[in-house]
């Protein structure tokens, strides 16, 4: 399909594509797709005020009725899956099945949130005072700001929005300035759900387009009590303290430096498949991409040989083409950063396999062969997240050293171990094991399901989104005590007789 046809199928109009100055290019071939209108900073106070006003209505709508809106969104997403998935491929460069997979993730979180809308459970707590009842109730909190990264241009919005809506909150979304088109198309889908729903307040779901300055308006506003920000640790280091300083609640989903430990007992056939998908899937541009392999010395040469063979068979090229496994990096700057990091790794004693620009037989985007880098130690370069398909290979002898290496990076998002040894698997998952928000056994680090809480520790930011009880991050907790007795006893036996 041509770019023009993909844009039209996703519902983007000439006005969407031509009436602004923000240039959007496809990573597939560098072609200019659009010049999108950016939200003027002067409009941000009005947009936030609309969300604040929508909140006063939406918070009183019963939660299961709020769930109905999310159910309709899920239906509209199902109907638009192919078109939106193709647009994700066009704007981000993901292969077709990953573009579709991203939309499926949106559908999955809608399903989850619809069920949740009847399960925003509180607690009843035993009171120490006779004739008293204590309870804990969850209430809507207010407008939620969502700042998202380029690499999951629509799923991250849906993780936040499906939960925020059933929790009773409006949403203002600022997508990455690299991916406004998928955001505009997603809002059209949301608009269809809102129209079918009928009586949702104006300003419930808003989109603002622009760079960090527009994001900063959400970050700085006391009328945005929850600010969910997904992106680099550099961005989180600016945004997190600013939100905290105004007593807001940041939900930070930042960079990862995800590792796999491969133990001597590992099923190497499974491990190789998991490693290759984890390291080169999405061209290494997932927050959960596999970046470090910590391999037992006894199997290291065998595993590296198998990986080298597997890497040689990977098809690199147009992500829309059947059979392509590795599409382009998002832009040339990303490719240049990858090549510079490989030079640093070489200077630190690394042996680099692959990691070359690819220009023959591919469109005019930033294509690379994935790099496998044998490192003598976990150097400064290995400890950084490079958003590209670089996999560093490290060696261990003692299992405790493998866990220490896995944890000895600033980030704490995802981790995994391949082993058939129960003691190793359970130790890895124990309090003395992986320090990451996600820890898997015999599964790679990427490709999380919607049912679990997603996020990581340390410089990954500590935020949790999506499943489990992540919804609590979008509500305020109220503890109430009701006295139905005829006396007024004080807690802890305190006497205060008048
Ligand atoms: P980025 O940090 O460059 O930008 C992310 C978003 O933050 C964009 O919308 C950008 O406009 C905005 N932004 C940047 N500076 C800001 C500021 N000072 N104030 C307000 N907003 C600001 O990240 P990117 O290149 O788009 O995405 C890649 C990064 O995102 C990687 O580090 C990846 O690991 C991370 N990521 C993390 C998760 C997760 O769930 N942990 C998911 C996806 C991506």
Image: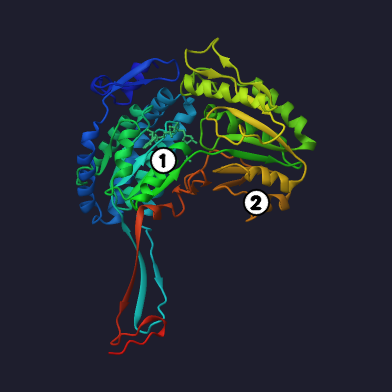
Residue positioned most to the top: 360
Is residue 227 something that shows in the picture?
yes
The residue beneath circle 1 is: 238
Element type where label 1 sits in the image: helix
Element type where label 2 sits in the image: loop
Alpha-carbon distance for marks 1 and 2? 30 Å
Q: Is residue 80 left or right of residue 404?
A: left
Q: Is residue 364 left or right of residue 65?
A: right
Near mark 1 (Cα within 10 A), the count class, few <14, some 14-19 or many ≥20, is few
The residue beneath circle 2 is: 433
What residue lies at 31% left-to-right and 90% top-to-bottom?
Answer: 497
Q: Is residue 314 left or right of residue 212?
A: right
What residue lies at 37% left-to-right and 36% top-to-bottom?
Answer: 78
Residue 385, percent from left and from top = 55, 34
Near mark 2 (Cα within 10 A), the count class, few <14, some 14-19 or many ≥20, is some
Residue 468, percent from left and from top = 46, 53
- Classify mark 1 as within 8 Å of ligand 1 or not, answering yes or no: yes
Count of labels in the image: 2
């Amino acid at each position: 399909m041509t770019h023009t046809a993909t844009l039209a199928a996703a519902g983007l109009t000439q006005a969407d594509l031509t009436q602004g100055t923000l240039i959007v290019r496809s990573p597939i071939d560098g072609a200019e797709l659009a010049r999108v209108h950016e939200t003027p900073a002067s409009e941000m106070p009005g947009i936030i005020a609309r969300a604040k006003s929508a909140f006063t209505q939406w918070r009183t709508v019963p939660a299961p009725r709020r769930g109905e809106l999310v159910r309709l969104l899920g239906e509209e997403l199902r109907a638009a899956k192919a078109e939106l998935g193709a647009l994700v491929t066009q704007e981000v460069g993901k292969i077709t099945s990953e573009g579709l997979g991203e939309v499926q993730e949106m559908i999955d979180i809608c399903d989850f949130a619809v069920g949740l809308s009847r399960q925003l459970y509180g607690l009843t707590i035993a009171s120490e005072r006779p004739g008293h009842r204590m309870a804990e109730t969850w209430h809507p909190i207010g407008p939620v700001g969502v700042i998202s990264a380029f690499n999951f241009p629509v799923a991250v919005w849906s993780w936040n929005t499906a939960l925020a809506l059933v929790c009773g909150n409006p949403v203002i979304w600022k997508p990455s300035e690299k991916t406004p088109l998928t955001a505009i198309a997603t809002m059209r889908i949301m608009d269809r759900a809102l129209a079918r729903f009928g009586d949702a307040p104006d300003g419930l779901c808003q989109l603002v387009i622009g760079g960090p300055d527009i994001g900063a308006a959400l970050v700085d506003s006391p009328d945005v009590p929850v600010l969910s920000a997904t992106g680099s640790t550099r961005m989180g280091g600016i945004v997190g303290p600013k939100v905290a300083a105004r007593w807001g609640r940041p939900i930070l989903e930042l960079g990862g430096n995800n590792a796999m430990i491969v133990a001597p007992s590992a099923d190497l056939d499974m491990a190789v498949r998991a490693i290759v998908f984890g390291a080169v899937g999405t061209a290494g541009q997932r927050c959960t991409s596999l970046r470090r392999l910590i391999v037992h010395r006894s199997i290291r040469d065998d595993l590296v040989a198998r990986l080298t063979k597997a890497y040689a068979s990977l098809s690199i090229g147009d992500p829309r083409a059947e059979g392509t496994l590795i599409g382009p990096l998002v832009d040339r700057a990303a490719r240049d950063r990858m090549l510079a990091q490989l030079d640093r790794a070489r200077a630190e004693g690394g042996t680099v396999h692959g990691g070359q620009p690819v220009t023959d037989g591919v469109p005019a985007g930033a294509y690379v062969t994935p790099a496998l880098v044998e490192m003598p130690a976990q150097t400064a370069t290995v400890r950084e997240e490079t958003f590209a398909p670089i996999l560093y290979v490290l060696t261990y002898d003692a299992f405790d050293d493998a866990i220490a290496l896995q944890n000895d990076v600033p980030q704490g998002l995802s981790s995994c171990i391949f082993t058939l040894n129960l003691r190793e698997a359970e130790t890895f998952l124990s309090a003395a094991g992986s320090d990451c928000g996600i820890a898997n056994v015999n599964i790679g680090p990427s490709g999380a399901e919607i049912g679990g809480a997603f996020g990581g520790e340390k410089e990954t930011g500590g935020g949790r989104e999506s499943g489990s009880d992540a919804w609590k991050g979008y509500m305020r907790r109220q503890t109430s005590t009701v006295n139905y007795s005829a006396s007024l006893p004080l807690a802890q036996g305190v006497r205060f007789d008048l």
